[in-house]
Image (cartoon, rainbow, N blue to C red):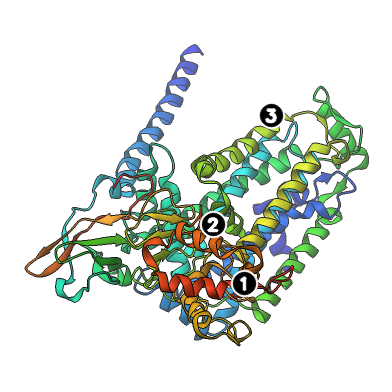
Amino acid sequence: VLKGVYGWLDDRLGISSALVPLMQHPVPPGLNWGYVLGSATLVAFIVQVVTGVGLAFTYVPAPNSAYETLQWISHQAILGNVVRGIHYFGASAMVIFIVFHLIQVFLTGGFKYPREVNWLTGTLLLLLTLGMAWTGQLLRWDQNAYWSIVVGAEYAARVPLIGEQLSAILLAGHTVGGATLTRFYATHVFLFPALIFGVVGLHLYLVVRHGISEPPRPGERVSKANYFARYYEMLRTRGEPFWPDAAWKDVVAAVAIGAVVLLLAIVVGAPELAAPADPTNVQAYPLPDWYFVWLFAVLALLPRGLENAFMIGFPLLAIVVLLALPFVANGGERHWSRRPWAVFAVGFSLLAIALLIREGYQAPWSPEMNPGPLPASVTQGLTGSEAAGAQVFTAKACHSCHAIGGSGGHRGPDLSDVGLRLSRDQMTARILTGALNMPSFAGNIDPTELEQLVDFLATRRASPGFFTAPSGE
Amino acid sequence: MDERIARREWLNRLSLGLMGLAGVVVSVPLISYLLSPLLRPPPPAWVDVGPADDFKQGETVLKSIKEVSPLPWAGQTAETAVWVRRMDQQTFTIFEVNCAHLGCPVMWKQEAELFLCPCHGGVYYADGTVAGGPPPRPLFRYENRVQNGTLQVRSRGLGLSTQAV
């Protein structure tokens, strides 16, 4: 009977006539683990869709309930925190795998003739994935989310000519309000996923249409003249069926990714939300999720004059470079060992992003809002005017930007040894006139306080040590 | 035979044309609906901050103000905050809490008489002028007036660093 049922289904669905041959289409031999990165990205996306649907069963996308429903998911719902954890780490997995998929295709020359449109659709998927990452973190509707939206609106406003309009479209108005959250929700849950499904479909169709690009060999140049004749001849003589000869690696990778994401969700869990979004609460230290921290760091480090040029020019340039690449570097060598500039570009970009992410988390440019009192090791033994000066140091918020004895901000120089470096006159002058990134205190410190402050600073003669411990992070 | 091909060509154009028309007809209301924030800017209005006598000269304090016409489900976003400084008996200066760099909330340090921004280290003096860091312009200000002893601000949207507000 089962055989009869299968025979009927096979006849009506075309399993053995269409689907099995598709799964078993020949692919080039010798595909290594680098070739699983595309399917790994797709697996991460499917995980996101499934857990996202789960979260949407409870999450209410309105400013007066979003935060509460998310807290309920995290702390009350059965295994809710695991679902949110999978969605959180799955997002990171999707960003990581799509970036490494791009790098792998770039270094193996897979984007060259005839697979230009594969690359273009992949670029679109990269942009959509980053769009998903950004809109997703806003749905938490905590202080980080609220102020990130404000930063996003200010960023959009820097675009020449249409900046104000873009900003209003992003906010669904002229301030963050009731309509803003639903806009990001609809984008994150309907618009972008629908586009991703569509573009992934096209991307996969192209993978089947052009075949998987054969692993490159040094010295073997792309030859357009008889490309397909040679490609099909290679498949006919040496090709292997995709299922299971190549696909087993994809399956193993998918299971491993699922296991790691699940483990992280259970053991580490999604991070706690910050305080609820509140425009009237200015006690916030907004920081994006790690995949945008490098951009956050760049925005603090840019010289003033270059800021607009970079904020608009860099994303534009990155997109233009990605879109132009398959046309500019259409032929030639495919193996990375014959393309030193390609290897350099990848190494340089990865290093720059890693360093900027590190810098972004340390954020030495951010003043310490509440550095607390000076450590006892600094204040002990101070008397009279020097002790009063230490009070002035904290009261006038010097401590927010200058560390002493391992405590305080890192915006300005560490002052643990300022007594060795500067004379009293130099200190007085600097305090009164300020500097490029230091306020002038001339209008806001009386002569006695200034005297006491300099008395205190003159006692600072300790070596700060080569590595001062960053505080309060 | 030629007639059939001509008819086929005509049907091809008709079908594509009908689909295009349907697309345009559906898009017009949808796109205008999505762009409505642009087409309908909020009317400016005077909003109460609080009794003018509550503010001491030389102090800068954080106050919440109501948005003009928030959506019923706006929750906490129906309010926003401003920094209010009383200059003298008659005049007040009211600052937006958003840093003029990229909009993060600035904190006021009373004794140091400075606004500090946590994001990228912008610093402003008590009068809102830039004392350090990346902000390209002073803190945004609100128009304000005292009406029957109540301090009021003229509400408006988020100040954008490219605008001349």
Residue A422 lies, with reference to residue B56, above or below; the image says above
- Label 3: state its secondary structure: helix
Judge whether A31 appears above or below B75 on screen: above
At 14% across and 63% down in the image, what residue appears? B90
- Quadrant in which residue A439 is drawn: bottom left
Residue holding disc 3 = A327
- Amino acid type at circle 3 is Phe
User: What type is the residue that disc 1 sits on?
Assistant: Ile
- Frontmost residue, B141 versus B56: B56
Q: Nearer the viewer, residue A139 or B17?
A: A139
Q: Which of A251 and A173 lies nearest the eye of the viewer? A: A173
Q: Earlier in the sequence, mark 3 or mark 1?
A: 1
Q: Earlier in the sequence, mark 2 or mark 1?
A: 1
- Residue A86 is labelled as 1
The residue labelled by disc 2 is A132
**10 Å crowding of disc 2: few (<14), some (14-19), many (20+):** many
The picture places residue A159, in percent across and down from the top left corner, at 44, 41
Q: In the current view of this chain or complex, which residue is farthest to the left?
A: B148
Would residue A411 appear left or right of A420 to someone viewing this image?
Answer: left
